[in-house]
């Protein structure tokens, strides 16, 4: 029997020629427990050779048009623009943008929120790694600002992340948002003294709308990595675990010729 497909397709009305997906933890990969089995991260404790094998498998099975542009993510707000196909080096950044057909952008997560973007006309795509630090620091706004497409002509998809019923945080996270924007308090639900469940999806939607993306063009945001151990890696749940990847690209072909 064939191994299950190791990804889910992004559920957004992207234009023809734009493709987006987010990988899951199982799919006939090479990584042993606790990275079982489709880990794509080379810095999470798994043998990097296993992760590289899984990356090759993903490229083949998902028919990627090229090697993904992997980033060295640091929970910051820097956006890297891929104007040429990526090389072996991994730029230090937490978001990436491209308008080049065939260039695949990759965002790694295991509870942080991956956000994928595309122009409504299919001419540009982007991806961002939005953990709470990056989200509070403005990585989504920086990504939208780095796109050459006006914000009102962009749509976004929120991928699998730590969900609002499972992700408990303390004062540091609460203050990082509410001290700057009191309305963010609605995304926090008290669980015990000085602790809250936080809705990263709600915070991201608020930031994206403030950046100029219409509410009706923000999709996804219903998959919890912590709660769904069958499908997703979760650093908060398991500590030592693998990494998933959310990918977006413009398919090369006649739609984008000339």
Image: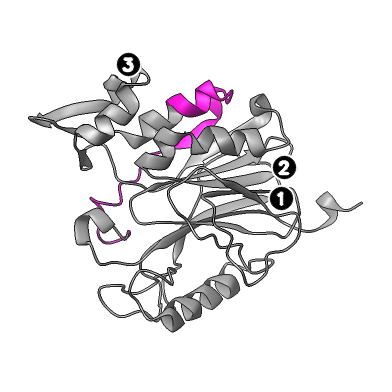
Q: Return the disc, 3 or 1, that comes first in the chain's sequence.
A: 1
Disc number lying in front (3 or 2): 3
Task: Write down the residue under mark 3.
Answer: 182
Q: Find out whether residue 7 is within the magenta segment.
A: no
Q: Return the disc, 3 or 2, that comes first in the chain's sequence.
A: 2
The quarter of the displayed image where residue 239 is located: bottom left
Q: Which label sits on residue 17?
A: 1
Q: Indicate whether 88 appears above or below 69.
A: below
Answer few, some or many: residues within 10 Å of disc 3's Cα (few below 14, many 20 plus, some between 14 and 19). few
The quarter of the displayed image where residue 14 is located: top right
Q: Quadrant of the N terminus?
A: bottom left
The quarter of the displayed image where residue 118 is located: top right
Q: CA distance from mark 3 to mark 2?
A: 36 Å
Q: At 56% across and 29% down in the image, what residue appears?
A: 217
Q: Is residue 1 shown left or right of residue 168?
A: right
Residue range highlighted in magenta: 206-232
Disc number lying in front (3 or 1): 3
Q: Is residue 175 shown left or right of residue 249?
A: left
Q: Position of residue 133 (x, y in %)?
A: 37, 41
Q: Are marks 2 and 1 in contact (CB under 8 Å)?
A: yes
Q: At 51% across and 28% down in the image, what residue appears?
A: 208
Can the viewer see residue 183 in this picture?
Answer: yes
Where disc 2 sits, the SS reads loop
Q: CA distance from mark 2 to mark 1?
A: 7 Å
Q: Indicate whether 174 appears above or below 79.
A: above
Q: Indicate whether 171 appears above or below 22.
A: above
Q: CA distance from mark 3 to mark 1?
A: 40 Å
Residue farthest to the top? 182
Q: Position of residue 184 (x, y in %)?
A: 33, 22
Task: Write down the residue under mark 2.
Answer: 122
């Amino acid at each position: 029997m064939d191994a299950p497909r190791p990804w889910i397709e992004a559920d957004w009305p992207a234009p023809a020629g734009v493709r987006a997906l987010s990988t899951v933890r199982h799919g006939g990969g090479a990584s042993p427990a606790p990275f079982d089995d489709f880990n794509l991260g080379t810095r999470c404790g798994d043998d990097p050779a296993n992760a590289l094998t899984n990356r090759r498998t993903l490229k083949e099975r998902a028919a990627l048009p090229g090697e993904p542009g992997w980033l060295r993510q640091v929970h910051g707000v820097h956006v890297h623009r891929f104007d040429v196909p990526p090389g072996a080096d991994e730029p230090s950044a937490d978001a990436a943008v491209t308008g080049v057909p065939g260039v695949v952008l990759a965002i790694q997560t295991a509870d942080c929120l991956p956000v994928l973007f595309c122009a409504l006309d299919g001419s540009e795509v982007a991806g961002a790694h939005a953990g709470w630090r990056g989200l509070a620091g403005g990585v989504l706004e920086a990504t939208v600002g780095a796109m050459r497409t006006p914000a009102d002509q962009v749509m976004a998809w929120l991928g699998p992340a730590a969900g609002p019923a499972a992700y408990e945080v303390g004062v540091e996270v609460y203050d990082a948002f509410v001290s700057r924007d009191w309305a963010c308090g609605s995304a926090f639900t008290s669980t015990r003294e000085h602790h809250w469940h936080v809705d990263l999806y709600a915070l991201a939607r608020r930031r994206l709308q403030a950046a100029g993306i219409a509410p009706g063009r923000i999709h996804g945001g219903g998959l919890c990595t912590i709660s769904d151990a069958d499908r997703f890696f979760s650093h908060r749940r398991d500590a030592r675990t693998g990494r998933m990847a959310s990918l977006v690209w413009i398919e090369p072909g006649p739609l984008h010729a000339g």
